[in-house]
Amino acid sequence: MEVKELFDLALQEHKKKKFLSAEKLYKKILETYPDEVSTLNNLGTVLKELGKNKEAIYYYEKALKFKPQDIVTNYNLGLTFSNLEEFQKSTNFYEKVIKIDPKHIQSYHNLMDIYEKTNNQKKLEKTVLDAKNFLKDNPIVKLYEGNLLYKKEKFSEAINNLESISFDLNKVKQEQLRVLILGKCYDRTKNFNKAFNCFVKANKIAFQLKNKNINKNFYLKKIESRKKFFNKLKKEKCSSLELLDGQNNPIFIIGFPRSGTTLLDTILSSHPSIEVIEEKSMVPQLIGSLNELTKNNFNNLKKINTDQIQKLRNNYFKNLYSHIKDKDNSKLYIDKLPLNIIYVGEILRIFPEAKFIISLRHPCDCVLSCFMQTFSINNAMANFLNLEDSAKLYDLVMELWTQYISTFHINYYEIKYENLVQNLETTVRPLLKFLELPWNSDVLTFSKTAKKRQQIKTPSYDQVIRPIYADAKDRWKMYEKQISNIFPILEPWIKKFNY
């Protein structure tokens, strides 16, 4: 087969998303024409689609050697480094593209997105100004300008900016972001009806965008199955195991989403003896391995032997430490993923001496905040697309947590978001005592720590860089009319948690 035929076939396979086949064909072409830039580029793109980002970079960089100013290659390198969360390298390539083509809107877009998500407000502002010079009245530039005005608390200006644009069906994500920021602006200007309508619209868009395989009921069944099993158990102390792995017992930050776990994470991370591993899948992977051993039958939890438990522990710590750059045995490493709360019963089987910090917030504020945010939609987060589902999920999760603390002797510490924002020092001091750590005043300047973090991977990434504020406390009272239908679901928990 001639090279042209090979190339045409590779393109066909590429367009059909038959990436493995396309990869082989492109590589075959390069055996004859190793300096063919379009083939090197296409191969890099295929490898990126296959998740082979580092290999993709190799071929993109090879293409650049032959054609350093190629816009497509430089842009693709920006995308690939962004996938690897190497944002400095990513932004370097986008900036290079803009130097070559000052009207390359997608590079401006990606730059603004990175600077916004990494809380780099100065560079975001500069990029918006540069983009405005070359792209007059471009809606994407105006979108980020509106977001910047919101961050600067120029809410009326932001509203005027964002109301002057809209996005069609080809840019649904941008429309979702526009409506979400508008909602936040209306909330801050006390126009609560308009704010609520914006959040409803943003969630409708999220529903349209979600993968068809995502099903909110799958997550609810996961909780119900645990409730059913652990409800049968009598109060018991987790079995004491003779495990000599030399590891400290793990510490977990748990709670319901939007209960203040990111604020708590940032405060604790400011202590020199603490590092919080944020939103990683160590526990879900542990539960996956445990399910294999128990054959998805909770009744087999007690049947797993010490050797099997030891292996599970070792794998957990191996995963944990893979997220730490410079391991320090003098530090405490805390695993923070709020909805790990549903796995507490299983965690205790593997780590009977584990410590848990549970973050609580007024149930109405917690549920309303989940509804007002944009999450990456999975089976769990799909429950936040309307208020009633959010409230039902809260009810289920807290019922399960209540079962756990009535069934097991759990070493846990309860902390309330409202206490953190009102009395930071007096709230954190006893928590540090629970963690067996001395007081350190660095925790009082936690916003400095937040600004140093490359990226905070939660919806509150742009809030924790601010000093302590109480704007979000009792927000639910402004939306009493809109949440009246879910109040009966949450009222028992308001009383239970003494709100």
Image: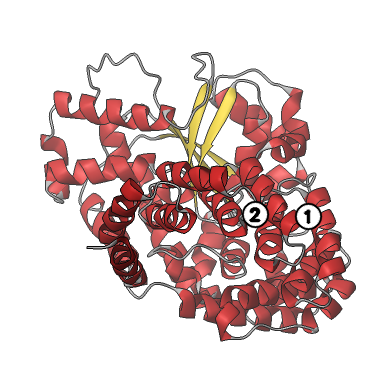
* Residue corresponding to mark 2: 460
Q: Of discs 2 and 1, which sits in the foreground?
A: 1
Please name the amino acid that badge 1 sits on.
Leu
On-image quarter of the C terminus: bottom right
At a point 32% along the width and 59% down the height, the residue shown is 223
Disc 2/disc 1 C-alpha distance (Å): 18 Å
- Residue 172, can we see it? yes
Verify CB contact (< 8 Å) between mark 2 and mark 1: no
Q: Quadrant of residue 148?
A: bottom right
At a point 89% along the width and 73% down the height, the residue shown is 157
* Total numbered badges shown on the rendered structure: 2
Measured as percent of width and height from the top left, residue 362 is found at 61, 58
* Residue corresponding to mark 1: 124
Measured as percent of width and height from the top left, residue 145 is found at 81, 67
Please name the amino acid that badge 2 sits on.
Ser
On-image quarter of the N terminus: bottom left
- Badge 1: few (under 14), some or many (20 or more) residues near its Cα, within 10 Å? many
Measured as percent of width and height from the top left, residue 237 is found at 28, 31
Q: Nearer the viewer, residue 264 or 239?
A: 264
For mark 1, give the secondary structure. Answer: helix
Measured as percent of width and height from the top left, residue 358 is found at 51, 43
